[in-house]
Image (cartoon, rainbow, N blue to C red):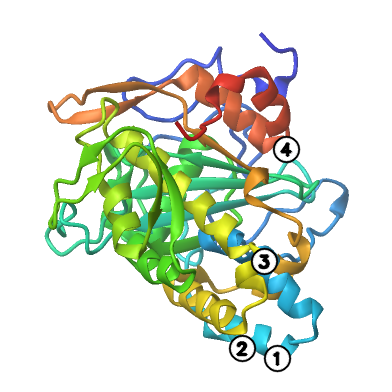
Amino acid sequence: MTDDPRLRGPRGSARVPNSGRAPGVYRSSGGGGNNPPPRGTAYGRGGQRPPRRGGSARPRWGRIALVGAVALSVIATVIGIGLWSYANGLNDDLNRVDAFAQLVGDRPVDEVDGDLNILVVGSDSRSPDNPTDGGNARTDTIMLMHIPASHDKAYIVSIPRDLYVSVPKDANGNGGEDAKINASFAWGGVPLLIQTVENYTNVRIDHVVEIDFSGLKEVVDALGGVEMNVEQTIDSIHKPYRTFEKGVNKMNGEEALDYVRQRYQFSDGDFARMRHQQQLIKAIMDKATSMGVMTDPSTLNGFLKTVIKAVRVDENFNLLDVAIQFRNLRSADLVFLTSPNQGTGESPTGESIVVSDDGAAAEMYAKMRLDSMAEWVTAHPEAVKKDK
């Protein structure tokens, strides 16, 4: 047990049954100390930051996205050779979403100057396994990306879409019950998902990026394909029923998207799909920063244009700020993790869910909040996800 009060859970990290909230230190604008807010509430008030300790202002970075991380060094190079107007045009072409204005209640307080937390929301609107549910959009991919103040790493935590959590009530009365975490996106869009993730992790989200995984097909094709290490030979369950042979495979966009959609053939099911999505991100990043792309103006332009089309960011995202701040980031600097859990189980109503490991989650997210993820990873090397 740590002696640091910031790392202790409230009242010994006890948890309300089925609440889905990782225990930790919860703060409110009323100085509530270690008492968590009532279930069904979240931290949010127009996306504005509370005063920071010491009164220092946070550096204005803008946002880093899932595929924005892939493009950091590429865009930094574009800026470095003087093509500011081109880079500005890319930033202007980004689609925007009002992610924070509708948030209600108190939000987690920033603990450290200089770090950055980004919620990455991915969907797969054209996946054969993901029909719309009553017209409501659903998110297949939820990742919390932590950039430390040192800017030398990116810790990307995949949150299982079926993780059973307490979904707080938003400004429109949506939510207010325990459910799978991706239900918050279907019920209240990005704002309610932000509230839910902050409520669960006690980590303040600075920025949000939405990406449709089906849009990555064009990104991969613009790069001329990517190499993926297939962990076991499988036959796709989707037309045209491709066979993916174990080992390194060169894939075009359609093939790569087909592979990362597979889950039933793997013993760990949806966890395998999350692992393969992470693998695809790294493959895209490796190819995008290769000399062949960097020295070919046509390929470079096609890649950047497809990236811009594939994402939607919040209103203050600034592509140039991101590129300058993280210009040295490479795929080797991405550390992939999964939110601590106890595997699958059943909800009170009998549906299949992923059960939170509250103690381990509290420890990891507290380290994220204190910008000490390197320390946590060193202590838990088995948690780092690697290609099989």
Spatial separation of the CA atoms under disc 4 and disc 2: 33 Å
Provide the secondary structure element on which disc 4 rests: loop
- Return the disc, 4 or 1, that comes first in the chain's sequence: 1
Disc 4 to disc 3: CB gap under 8 Å: no
For disc 1, the marked residue is: 85
Along the line of sight, which residue is nearer the eye, 337 or 57? 337
**Badge 3 amino acid:** Met
Across and down, in percent, residue 134 comes to 11, 60
For disc 3, the marked residue is: 291
Spatial separation of the CA atoms under disc 4 and disc 1: 35 Å
User: Mark 3, residues whose alpha carbon is within 10 Å: few (<14), some, or many (≥20)?
Assistant: few
Across and down, in percent, residue 173 comes to 29, 55
- Return the disc, 3 or 2, that comes first in the chain's sequence: 2
For disc 2, the marked residue is: 89
- Return the disc, 4 or 3, that comes first in the chain's sequence: 3
For disc 4, the marked residue is: 371
Please say if 319 is above or below 275. below
